[in-house]
Amino acid sequence: FTALTADFVPQRQMGIASGVMAIMQLMGSCTGFALLTFVLEVQNSYLMYAGVLFLGVALTILGVVDLETPLDADQAPVTWAALAQCYTITPTTHGDFFWVFVVRLFYYLAVSIQAFLLYYLHDAIGVDSAKETLVTMVMALQLAGALVSVPAGTFSDKYGRKTILMAACGFVAVIYGVFMTFPPLPVVYAAGMCYGMANSALMTVEYALACDTLPDKSQTARDLGLWGVAAFLGGTFGPLIMGPVLHLAGSQEGTSEYSKTGYIALFLCGIAFILASGATLKLVRGST
């Protein structure tokens, strides 16, 4: 659906369209999270997922007029070299889109710190019911994020993408700094909701920026798929980097809990990655 949106929405409205997409993602995630946590058994959740996926695909197929022309019967066969070319991205071949790819990579490296929030709540904040607390916090920050996605997108249509993205990156860095002070749980909740709003603004405007900088409008699906690879790489390698950092800096003899020093090192990594994401935006020249 990321490619469909880019095909149908004019560039001047891409920000607000991205905001609507972010709302749907956040609300869908929040609803699924609530159902899985409070209503459904795990085995039943797969049936729900399959049903919702089938309904969504069916509505898209029936309701969207496809703009693409039929495939040429004489099209050259797919080769390994052609497949490798699809995964090749450089400043020379993709221009600004390459730097947007790097922005997304650093962003997902930074937010992969979420994988350790359960341990943070238990070890550093001292929450006994850390799982239940994390569930309610995640739902709250997703709802908070849904409130700002459309305004952030609309603002970016009028005043530019990079300003909002840089501000949101700085805001996330400040929130990580707040977490490093190990405040009382209500402050952690409040910081988490602020994090949700900043994260929503980043999700919304980052997609609009990617659409603005596509190098070839006839290859939208391919390039946005490549852009999605940056999220996969960041979400995969982030925990692989931060996990050892937490262990080396925070492991303690005689207990499985990590020290506050370890979590400070963890959040410093997150700050470094999110600031790198914001700094890389300076290299994007073709969009405001």
Image (spheres, grey):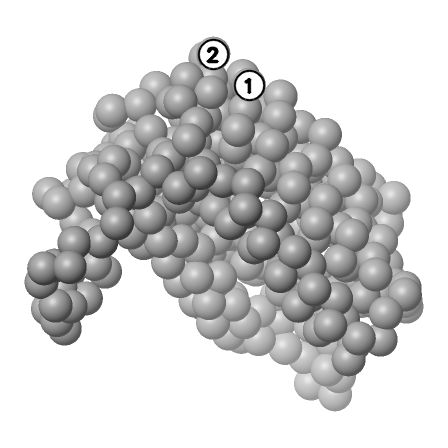
Tell me which amino acid carries mark 1.
Thr
Residue 170 in view? no
Left or right relative to 269: residue 84: left
Left or right relative to 194: residue 151: left
Percent position of residue 268, x then y: 53, 52
Residue that protrudes farthest toward the top in the picture: 158
The residue that label 2 is drawn on is: 158
Can you tell which quarter of the image residue 187 is in? top right
Point out which mark residue 173 bears.
none
Mark 1 touches mark 2? (CB < 8 Å): yes
Percent position of residue 19, x then y: 58, 31
Percent position of residue 141, x then y: 74, 43
Mark 1 is surrounded, within 10 Å at the Cα level, by few (under 14), some (14 to 19) or many (20 or more) other residues, namely many
Q: Residue at x 47, y 72 (%)?
A: 240
Q: Residue at x 57, y 38 (%)?
A: 21
Point out which mark residue 154 bears.
1
Vertical placement of 211 versus 243: above or below? above
Disc 2 element: helix
Tell me which amino acid carries mark 2.
Lys
Residue that protrudes farthest toward the bottom in the picture: 254
Left or right relative to 136: residue 198: left
Q: Residue at x 46, y 67 (%)?
A: 236
Pick the quarter of the image with the C terminus: top left
Mark 2 is surrounded, within 10 Å at the Cα level, by few (under 14), some (14 to 19) or many (20 or more) other residues, namely few
Residue 257 in view? yes
Q: Nearer the viewer, residue 229 or 180?
A: 229
Disc 1 element: helix
Q: Residue at x 84, y 75 (%)?
A: 41
The count of marks equals 2
Percent position of residue 101, x then y: 32, 46
Left or right relative to 196: residue 136: right
Q: Nearer the viewer, residue 207 or 66?
A: 66
